[in-house]
Image: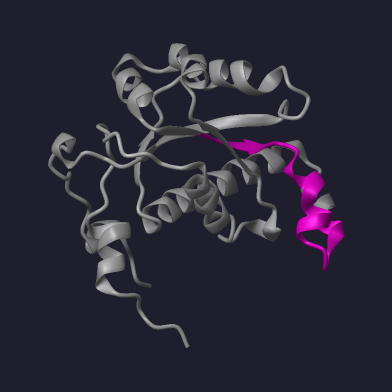
Amino acid sequence: MNKPIADAALDQIWRNARSHNVWTDKAVPETLIRATYDLAKMGPTSANCSPARFVFLQSGAAKERLLPFLMEGNRDKTMAAPWVVIIAHDLDFHEKIPDLFPHNPGARDWFLDPVNREITAFRNGTLSGAYLMLAARALGLDCGPMSGFDNAGVDQAFFLDNPATATWRSNWLCSLGHGDDGGLFPRSPRLPFDDACQIL
């Protein structure tokens, strides 16, 4: 039987975790990025469809490709981050379902309708992006999620001209690294249970 995890872990992942805008120069090795994905991929998705796709940008050249599509207020902090990940989803995710859902490979046909497929890809890709953030925090990284960018421009620059990624679509961005707490704003309030929830 599962038991609640330690308060220190809850603090690191939830209570004390913040969205960072300023980064230290502490190195983040590729092995840690790979470990973050390997943890995040274990999160559940519909029929294990796993539509999320992640493009991790580390080099200055890769970030420069992203720069023109960022809102002005997001540019400096994105360029300063050790890593930036484009969190995307594959509109043709269903083609991999026979491998990912082997006890029922016919589940691929549940997603033949392109409208349903796009909705499923977006929903589950977003969910997997959240898993990635939680995995990063669990492994000692800080996150700087953002949505202030030109999705169509990013898709054109990173996906559409490559047959291997032509069906990928960007959702949001997240910087990864070790945040500088001195750059944090005061935490904004959250809704209390009674304003956000119902028990029926």
Residue at 84% across, 55% down: 98
In the displayed orientation, state which residue is furthest to the bottom.
1
Coordinates of residue 13 in the picture (x, y in percent): 33, 58
Magenta-drawn stretch contains 89: yes
Coordinates of residue 97 in the picture (x, y in percent): 78, 53
Coordinates of residue 164 in the picture (x, y in percent): 76, 29
Residue at 51% across, 42% down: 30
In the displayed orientation, state which residue is furthest to the top.
68
- In the image, residue 190 sits, relative to residue 10, either above or below, namely above
- In the image, residue 129 sits, relative to residue 115, either above or below, namely below
Q: Is 164 left, or right, of 181 in this rendering?
A: right
Q: Quadrant of residue 70?
A: top left
- In the image, residue 139 sits, relative to residue 8, either above or below, namely above
Q: Is 7 left, or right, of 48 in this rendering?
A: left
- In the image, residue 189 sits, relative to residue 172, either above or below, namely below
Which one is nearer the viewer's eye here, 125 or 81? 81
Specify start and end residues of the magenta stretch as a single range. Answer: 86-107
Residue at 52% across, 48% down: 31
Color scheme of the displayed model? one colour
Q: Quadrant of the C terminus?
A: bottom left
Which one is nearer the viewer's eye here, 43 or 77? 77
Magenta-drawn stretch contains 54: no
Q: Is 158 left, or right, of 36 in this rendering?
A: right
Residue at 45% across, 32% down: 84
Coordinates of residue 167 in the picture (x, y in percent): 72, 30
What count of labels does the image hold? 0
Which one is nearer the viewer's eye here, 11 or 189? 11
